Image (cartoon, rainbow, N blue to C red):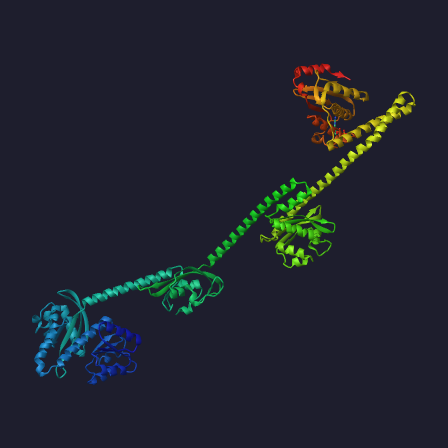
Amino acid sequence: MIVNAVHHKSKLRRRSHILRQAGYEVLEARTGPDALALVARAHPALLVLDTRLPDFSPVDLCRQLKSNPATQTTFILQTSAANEAHGDQAADGADHLLREPVKASDLIAAIHLLLRLREAQHALRARTPQSMADGDNLLETIVNSMTDGIYAKNLQGRYVLVNPAGAAYVGSTVAEMLGKEFAAILPPDEARAVMEEDRQVIATGEPQPIENTRMTPNGWRTFQSIKTPYRDAAGAIIGVVAISRDISERKRADQEREQLMQQLLAERTRLETIIQQIPSALAVVEAPSGKVILANAQRDQVLRMETPTIDGVEQYNVIEGFHPNGRTYRPEEWPLARSLLTGEVVIGEEINVVFGDGARGAIRVNSTPIRDETGRITSGIVIFDDISDHKRLVEARNHLLLREHAARAAAEKAQRRSAALAEVSALLVASLDFDATLKIVARVVIPSFADYCAVWMLDGDRTRQVAEAHCDPQHEEWLRELAQRYAPPVQNPMSPQEQLLRSGETVVIPEMPASLSDSLSVDPEVRRIWRDLGTQSLVIAPLMVQGQALGAMTFAMSLSGRRYDEADREFAQEIARRAALAIDNARLYQKAEAAVRIRDQFLSVASHELKTPLTALVGYADLLQQRAAEGRFAERDQRAIRVIAQQIARLEKMIGSLFDLSRLEKGQFDIEGAPVELNDLAQQVALQINPTLKRHTLAVRTASAPVVIFGDEAHLQQALQNLIQNAIKYSPLGGPIDVQVERAGMVATIAVTDHGIGIPAAALPQLFDRFYRASNAEAWHINGMGIGLYIVKEIVRLHGGEVKIESEEGSGSTFTICLPLASNETSAPGNEGEASIQNAAASVAV
Ligand code: ADP
């Protein structure tokens, strides 16, 4: 048993641990009195005494122990600091002294030897005269069986006792060594060293620990020895006893351990260097406390502060961290704390923080627990980086991306809308019917731009809904019902309609106030329908025509939950603009149609009503002319009567034309069918007209053979007359008029050619329209109604033919009536070439 007396607590524990590991039973004392009491009570074999006990000087302690018979048998091994001034004196009372730092192996070796020595002493003390012989035997047995080498030399250096182990150590035998001087046994170098040691022991009278390495028959070995002087009964030193132990193996083990330790140290240094080199912040903590045991410099840089010592998880709030919802991280919520407490491995947790310098930013954290082989968490590692810049970049990029998306969406929307506009325009342009246009206008924007749309027009002092469309047919019914019940007056300056119509500005209401339905009308039914429609958002765009609002279009979102915003204003306006144009066109067209209807009515009535008095006038004019021919009137009166007759004839023609026109319009123009020979017909007409000509000559060139068609002779005559009259009228300077009858294949033609004013090319396409007159006719002050050609065209059309024109302004014109030949005429004899020659020969000047 050993009493271990050390004041310093951890040193005491460490030393006890070493002793216990070496197999000794240990009692501990931290003060001088404790040590005294313990030694007295427990009678330990050895007291290991640390010099630095606070209350007792080691010298006093040793003296007290050695002077007390109850404690004097206890050996004292004292350890003292190398720099302690009283070190040597302290050793006065102790049996052995070791200088700090004391290696564990040295301590144990010294203890071992001391205990052996004590055992030997005890054995000697126990000798009684009776037991002397036994004792000698016993002692000899002990000494001889010991594995430690034991040597005793007298003052002359002769061996008086050597055990076999001792002899073996020096490569000799007991018999060889006993009685010999050591100088004769040991090699010279060694002998010198031994002599010096012995001299010291004898000089100090104190035991000396010695460690040396020497060549033996077993190679280089290290020995640890303790040399003690031995005395006679009077106390005089008579020799030196040495006990040596071969500690080569232990030494090697120590060296190996030392090497391992060095390696470990190097490893640790390397690890630390690596940790310092890591660009991320890193800290290692022990578990379960969370105390930081290692951290790199980068940690302070990332945290932007001199990080204080952290002894536990509860101090983890060195900087402030925030959850995505803005709540502050509690100490135990930080990733490292979670790794230690729950074993969680955290990878890439991003935390918004306020750094040590007060700046805001973000860090990305990885943390993991480290476990021993039993799975117990022994420590934890956290690695984190400042990602503030990166995050800002990402945010900026996201922002850009969002903007790009928005721009693309806007572009797509614009594209869709321009397509919609194109469709709207196409639909609107196609319609001239007023009511249909209104319906189209309301319908085209559903559902792309509105859930429903209503068109309303100003009607006196009220607005009237004139068309509506809803994506849900039931709701469309409600819209109609609402329109019937609700036609608000616009005079009220507070009404939005009034404002809208006055200012011509489009109104955008992104969010309909819920209260609106109540203020809308006193009629509960109106309010109910309005509520049921569930209008969420509105755009009202005026229908402007020539700076005046005719009405407006209401675009509304209801069922879809969509909302309008300012960006929709322009599109709504554009739709309304196009709609207004279409409505205006349709309205104008409607007006024009009404005007035409009235004119036609007038034509019909007028031509009928004029016919009766005209018939009477014609009759009396004829009578007057007959009488004039009988010479009943004076020359002047006769001239007047001629003028009356001429003008009546002209009037008759005009009224006839109007009458024909009216009948044509009403579809009452009857064509009677009979074979008609065109050569004849042309000549007859020429005969009728010829007497009236003054400045013109009219020539008819007939075809060589009869040209027979099937038709109405009177109307065909009328058509030819109209063409010849025009040829005369539009050749105001006179000249030849040619009429040529021909047949070409299955077609009969009558062409009328003049050399008059001709027709401007631009007028040709409309020349056969009712009431159309070419601009040069007006310029030459040639009167006319623009009906004649229309009647010609209609007559020819009713015969299944057509009228062609060739004309050049200023050079004259040729109008050609083309008619299908009567069916038995198509195979008429003679070829075209001959016919035209014959025609030329047969032309007659009339
Ligand atoms: P009106 O002669 O009464 O004006 P028409 O229907 O007979 O009406 O003719 C329509 C128009 O065609 C005339 O106004 C005139 O401009 C043009 N036109 C018809 N015939 C001729 C012609 N032979 N030469 C030149 N212009 C003609």
- Compared across the picture, whether 92 is left or right of 282 comes to left
Residue 227 drawn at (x, y percent): 16, 75
* Quarter residue 382 falls in: bottom left
Examine the rendered structure and indicate whether residue 129 appears above or below residue 321.
below
* Quarter residue 3 falls in: bottom left
- Compared across the picture, whether 226 is left or right of 757 comes to left
Number of dots carrying numbers: 0
Residue in front for this viewpoint, 258 or 187: 258
- Compared across the picture, whether 639 is left or right of 512 comes to right
Q: What residue is shown at x 68% (from left), y 41% (from top)?
A: 433
Q: What residue is shown at x 74% (from left), y 18% (from top)?
A: 680
Residue 609 drawn at (x, y percent): 81, 33
- Compared across the picture, whether 24 is left or right of 424 comes to left
Residue in front for this viewpoint, 83 or 178: 178
Q: Is residue 247 visible?
A: yes
Specify the quadrant that holds the N terminus: bottom left
Residue 506 drawn at (x, y percent): 66, 51
Residue in front for this viewpoint, 509 or 355: 509
Residue 457 drawn at (x, y percent): 70, 48
Specify the quadrant that holds the C terminus: top right
Examine the rendered structure and indicate whether residue 98 appears above or below residue 683.
below
**View quadrant of ligand 1:** top right
Residue in front for this viewpoint, 369 or 257: 369
Q: Is residue 643 visible?
A: no
Examine the rendered structure and indicate whether residue 840 appears above or below residue 769.
above
